[in-house]
Amino acid sequence: MIKLYSRGEVLFFSVLSAAIALAIAAGVSFLPRFFSSGSDGGDVNTAVVQDPRTHATLEVLSSLQRASLPVQVNMPELAAFTESERTNIAIYEQLNAGVVNITTETVAINWFLEPVPQAGSSGSGSIISDQGYVLTNYHVIRNANRIDITLASGEQFEGRVIGTDPENDLAVLRFDPPPGLNLRVIPFGSSANLRVGQKVLAIGNPFALERTLTVGIVSGLGRPIQTSPRHIIRNMIQTDASINPGNSGGPLLNAQGQMIGINTVIYSPTGGSVGIGFAVPVDTARRVVAEIIAHGSVRRGWIDATVVQIFPALVRHANLPVNSGFMVSRTRRNGLAERAGIRQGTQPVQHGRSVIYLGGDIITAVNGIQTNNLADLYSALENSRPGDIVRVDIVRAGQALSLNIPLADREEVLSR
């Protein structure tokens, strides 16, 4: 039910529309039958596992990949095997030590309101620095009160969260290797020039079977996978290499022994592998891991305005010219969006307990990505930073226009 209000009546409402987009987006459904290849939990207890970051950022980043060595495939002891077998054996024998087993502990509250530790999730990770940095999936360590990292040698270390990027389901952990312990680093490759049919290898800990190798091909590229109502991970790598619960966070490797992806989710009617798995492209990890290490999170840009996802009742009431997109309810006075030409609404209406303003511009696409729902909007701005300029397609009074808009900091905009 939409009710018109006068300007004077609007002043009586204390809850404005800053959170409208999030509330409306609660109706956006998860994609069915997609499962993370590790157990799920809640949010990481960063107060417990936060890293003090004693190293300068540049020094830390310069150490990433420093200890990675090329995989030697043509070894004399492998002469009796086929070329494909030699590749598989050499990559496994030389890189499996760079894959770690990650187990977590969570805390539950019993009937007497006492905290009780209990087993959490398990997954895999790749050592990406000789200083003990590990790349894994965010969902592997989500809700963790304690994180244990087990090496191929059986040595176990307590890990701590350096930072996370839930939008790409990535996290960076760290443990403290003792002096003299040489870590095997999984070298970064590139996911830019992958081809369907290309050979890939996955190393991980499915069902707690440590350091399991599976082999397959790149089955598809550019797959968009929705992982939550807000988030779509675009350009995922699809593979038929067997991936199961426990493989999450482990590396997907090319035939040169380079990481090209981070194994993340599987498609399965039963929860087990049916040969359809997905990995986050390593180029995405390259882009965000430095910021995760430096700041603990990834700063992203956002349109400096309060927007409302269009819904059927709003279309009917306001006689909108489109059926999907985001209506600009309010802009910050003299803010980035307003100065770039975005127009806010002028006619206040009540929707539930909130007030929105009709008549503003309708955002239909950002940088060429259609923004039909909240996940689309997050996805369109996932690769942006505060200060970046994006092309925003809008509909104003029935006319299609495009504007170049500088972005504000998303956390600041959404916290207003």
Image (spheres, rainbow, N blue to C red):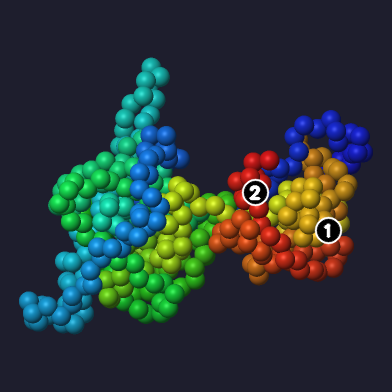
The quadrant holding residue 243 is bottom left
What amino acid does circle 1 point to? Answer: Leu
In the rendered image, which quarter contains the N terminus?
A: top right
Q: Report how far apart the C-alphas of labels 1 and 2 lie in the structure.
A: 19 Å
Kind of element beneath mark 2: helix
Name the residue tied to disc 1: 320
Going by the image, does 314 lie left or right of 227? right
What amino acid does circle 2 point to? Answer: Ala
* Residue at the image point whose x is 21% and y is 79% from the top: 84
* Residue at the image point whose x is 63% and y is 62% from the top: 388
Q: Which circle's residue, 1 or 2, is located before the other in the chain?
A: 2
Residue 314, percent from left and from top: 80, 51
Q: Please tell me which residue lies in front, 416 or 245.
A: 416
Q: Are marks 1 and 2 in contact (CB under 8 Å)?
A: no
Name the residue tied to disc 2: 25
The numbered disc on residue 222 is: none
